Image (cartoon, rainbow, N blue to C red):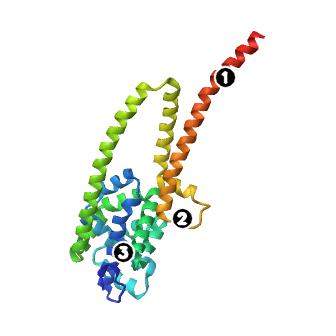
Amino acid sequence: MDLLFYHGDETEKRLVAVAYRAAESILRSFKYLLPSIGSELWALLSVDALWGLALLAAGWFLTSVISGPLGLAVNVIFLAYGVWQVWGTIGDTYALLKDWFWGFYNATTEPELDEAGRHFAEGLAKGGLTLIELLVTHKALKFASRKLAAKYPPPERFRERFQEEQRKAQSQRESSKRQGEQTEAERRRAASEATPKERKALERLQELRRTVEARGGIELGQDLSKNLPSPSAGHVVAIGVIGLAVTGLFALAAAASQEDEQPRKRRSRKKRSAR
């Protein structure tokens, strides 16, 4: 059986398999993250740091939540590394990432791992990135994760997957940078040619874009899809993009309407004065 989806009774193999699913689901989360959050997460991670974090997450979940004979056996393994001192710090992530923990633990198929990745992305968007940063940079946790990773090294296939996703992210960042430079040049040229009314409307749209980016595309999509039956992750993201476009059009129309209304009001006041 593939190690990734192993759910058997061998304690150490089960621990590694659960950690493997945790790490793999994090790699899959990047497609659900805003580029800005994804870049911050990549800056924190190396293949060894991610694997160590996954081992700690798997170990904490098995001992603290699953418990039972499996949890007790894993706890004996972890006691040798002193991680009990930082169990509380790892547990602090559970409130935000509960669906992710259960998702990677129970996953038996590729789509279920994708779903766990989506839950991880949602947790980060709600503030989980700060907790992940704390876990990755915590001295005691770094020490424990290095020791654990030395005893339970990451599967070779996981190393390959990490490098694949890293190259993909780098390519996307470079493409976005080029597009951003081109878009900025076009924006400046258009702004120089725009009328005062159009410039004010563009400024309002830029403020709207910054507001939406601060909230996150996933949250916007979720807000707009609350009344839809069982929206998928792709639908949520698509709805978020559509919502942004529609909201932008409304803002542009409102801005234009306001600009058109002001001359009419001035003409009306002049007519009343003339009477």
Instruction: Say whether disc 1 or disc 3 marks the residue closer to the N-terminus.
Output: 3
Location of mark 2 (residue): 231
- Distance from the alpha carbon under mark 1 to that under mark 3: 66 Å
Q: Position of residue 92 (x, y in %)?
A: 44, 65
On the image, which quarter does residue 62 sit in?
bottom left
| Residue at disc 2, secondary structure | loop
Instruction: Say whether disc 2 or disc 3 marks the residue closer to the N-terminus.
Output: 3
Location of mark 1 (residue): 264
What crowding class fits label 1: few (fewer than 14 Cα within 10 Å), some (14-19), or many (20 or more)? Answer: few
Q: Position of residue 52 (x, y in %)?
A: 28, 69
What crowding class fits label 2: few (fewer than 14 Cα within 10 Å), some (14-19), or many (20 or more)? Answer: some
Residue closest to the far top: 274
167, 175: nearer the viewer = 175
Placement of 135 over or under 247, stated as above or below: below
1, 185: nearer the viewer = 185
Residue for point 35% across, 57% down = 133
Placement of 8 over or under 139, stated as above or below: below
Residue for point 53% across, 50% down = 243
| Residue at disc 1, secondary structure | helix
